[in-house]
């Protein structure tokens, strides 16, 4: 009669010294829920949430999604170029104001967030809520 080997597997939540440290990553759904609450505010036009492999876009006027995406990417690239050229270091947030529109750009973990709003909206309260 063959003998069956028994194996015992014990799972613990502890991290061993020799293994790489486990990173706790923020759930995208938590960020999206927060952005949905922000979008419900008066004067907020919408947002773009970018991760390394995906993006979520929620803009009140769907016909302008591409315009807002291009504006967001261009503003972010320009800010990074200026920061590098003048050796300013990493920016915690970037605000671009136009004639009637304002954009708040920030990075939270591995996610890049762009919030579009009318010029009269207080972007500092939105930043504090997201950061």
Image (spheres, grey):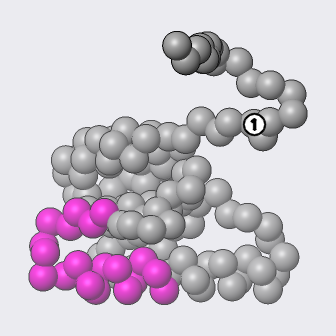
Work out whether residue 91 can be spotted: yes
Question: Does 55 appear in magenta?
Answer: no
Quadrant position of the C terminus in the picture: top right
| Element assignment for label 1 | loop
Which residue lies at the image location 31% right of the left edge and 79% below the top edge? Answer: 68
Residue 76, how many percent across, how many down?
A: 54, 77
Which residue lies at the image location 36% right of the left edge and 66% below the top edge? Answer: 55
Q: Which residues are the magenta region?
A: 56-74
Question: Does 63 appear in magenta?
Answer: yes
Q: Is residue 72 left or right of residue 65?
A: right
Foreground of the two, 13 or 93: 13
Residue 70 found in image quarter:
bottom left
Q: Main secondary structure of the magenta part?
A: helix
Residue 12 found in image quarter:
top right
Work out whether residue 38 can be spotted: no
Foreground of the two, 93 or 69: 69
Which residue lies at the image location 39% right of the left edge and 47% below the top edge? Answer: 28
Q: Is residue 113 left or right of residue 8?
A: left
- Looking at the rendered structure, the number of numbered marks drawn on it comes to 1
Residue 110 found in image quarter:
bottom right
Residue lying farthest to the front in this orientation: 1
In the depicted structure, whether residue 13 falls above or below residue 68:
above
Which residue lies at the image location 80% right of the left edge and 36% below the top edge? Answer: 19
Residue 47, how many percent across, how many down?
A: 31, 62
In the depicted structure, whether residue 77 falls above or below residue 102:
below
**Label 1 neighbour load within 10 Å: few <14, some 14-19, many 20+:** few
Foreground of the two, 107 or 52: 52
Which residue is identified by label 1? 21
């Amino acid at each position: 009669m063959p003998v069956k080997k028994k194996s015992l597997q014990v799972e613990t939540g502890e991290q061993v010294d020799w293994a790489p440290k486990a990173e706790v990553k923020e759930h995208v759904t938590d960020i999206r829920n927060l952005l949905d609450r922000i979008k419900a505010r008066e004067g907020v036009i919408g947002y773009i949430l970018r991760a390394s492999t995906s993006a979520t876009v929620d803009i009140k006027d769907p016909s302008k999604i591409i315009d807002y995406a291009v504006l967001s990417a261009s503003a972010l690239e320009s800010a990074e170029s200026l920061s590098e050229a003048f050796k300013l270091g990493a920016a915690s947030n970037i605000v671009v104001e136009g004639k009637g529109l304002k954009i708040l750009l920030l990075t939270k973990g591995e996610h890049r967030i762009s919030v579009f709003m009318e010029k009269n909206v207080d972007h500092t309260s939105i930043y504090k809520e997201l950061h």
